Amino acid sequence: MTYIEKGSTEYIKASLALFFGGFVTFAILYTTQPLLPIFAKEFHVSAASASLTVSASTGTLAVMMLVAASLSDQTGKKNVMMMSMLLTSMLAMAMAFCPNFISLVLARTFLGMAAAGIPSLAMAYVAEEFHPAGIGKVMGLYISGTSIGGMAGRILTGVLTDLFSWRTALFAIGAISLLLSVIFALILPAPRHSVKKPLNGKTALRAYAVHLRNKPLMALIVLGFLFMGGFVTLYNYIGFLLSEPPYSFSQSVLGFLFIVYIFGSFSSVYMGRKADLHGHALVLSISVALTALGAVATLVPSVIAKIIGLSLFTFGFFGCHSIASAWIGERANVNKAQASSLYLLFYYLGSSLAGTAGGYFWTHLHWLGVIAFIVTLLLLSYPLIGYAHKRLE
């Protein structure tokens, strides 16, 4: 069977479709992140409670990805991804009509369940369908879609909230996502390298058990928790910091801060390509260092310094995610969808658990406590990278 080769029409269509998949998922998944200070005031809840509108989605998404990966063995990766995007978009539109905080969190919980199809299967689709020599770059293209989607969703949320309301903003993002979901369904090539299997619980558990017994691979998988936990924690609570005096930024300005995601779009491709050339461990270690340095730079009171720190932090994080994703895709010799799902299980559990835990550090230790928590998570990644490099490379 032939792979999707660089330069072909299929390559262009598949790359664009995967870009849209990442765009839609992350535009919707984190669209409430810049709204956390508004939710805290409007619904009279704490910062940690407001963060549940993010954590509830990522937590259920983390668990449902395990189901989506096994479901795809029976119904096909494209079908599951397509239905995931369509349902997520429609739920995002419906979310605008939630009457209170509890219903909003419940809606976000169901949205997380629906959104599981894309992140759990896009990585496996890339690993199976594209030529192995270019996996790092293509994975970077998909992840660049996630970064641009996250950026666009947050900026649009901020602007529309200031102009109209947060409800109008959520509905508009859902409608745009629905259109992109239809395009995705029309242009993504059907998988040719995956074999449909009957849905069997024991078979699925055995597929995951293979990876759980692979300690070097699990070291890479756990990295997802540390990377995403730190990333979401910073972006969850920087809005609280910058909405307070002496900054007192408006919702539009807070939204536009997420334009630094463009550095993530660049780094996911650039660092992925560098990892293909110079080795995963070296480039991943450099990316972690850049992420930590960016986080520390946000401690400087100057707004300019904070924006530079955010830019460096985002550049480093997306490099980390791109390299770890590609490394797992290459080293999982069997059951690639399940390997990707395990990585993303830890990745989104980091978003959910660490992202909410960061509220404790914000409440009790303010911004210094938040950054100390993030840097600690990042430093814990180094022994895992070293162990995986020693056993896998």
Image (spheres, rainbow, N blue to C red):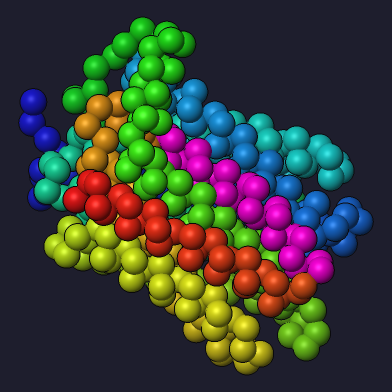
Residue 301 figure quarter: bottom right
User: In the image, is residue 332 part of the stretch drawn in magenta?
Assistant: no
Image quadrant holding the N terminus, namely top left
Residue positioned 27% across, 41% down in the render: 329
Residue positioned 34% across, 25% down in the render: 210
Residue 81 figure quarter: top left
Q: Nearer the viewer, residue 158 or 375?
A: 375
Q: Nearer the viewer, residue 275 or 242?
A: 275
| Coordinates of residue 323 in the picture (x, y in percent) | 31, 56
Q: Is residue 124 left or right of residue 305?
A: left
User: In the image, is residue 345 part of the stretch drawn in magenta?
Assistant: yes
Residue positioned 24% across, 47% down in the render: 391
Q: Is residue 159 left or right of residue 89?
A: right
Q: Is residue 199 left or right of residue 360?
A: left
Q: How many marks?
A: 0
Determine whether 149 is above or below 185 in the image: below
Determine whether 259 is above or below 97 in the image: below
Q: Is residue 190 left or right of residue 28?
A: left
| Coordinates of residue 384 in the picture (x, y in percent) | 39, 54
Question: Magenta region, mostly helix, strand or loop?
Answer: helix
| Coordinates of residue 374 in the picture (x, y in percent) | 58, 66
Q: Is residue 35 visible?
A: no
Q: Is residue 317 visible?
A: yes
| Coordinates of residue 189 in the picture (x, y in percent) | 24, 32
Q: Nearer the viewer, residue 256 or 41?
A: 41
Q: Which residues are magenta?
A: 341-364
The single residue placed furthest to the right in the displayed view is 44
Residue positioned 50% across, 42% down in the render: 346
Residue 266 figure quarter: bottom left
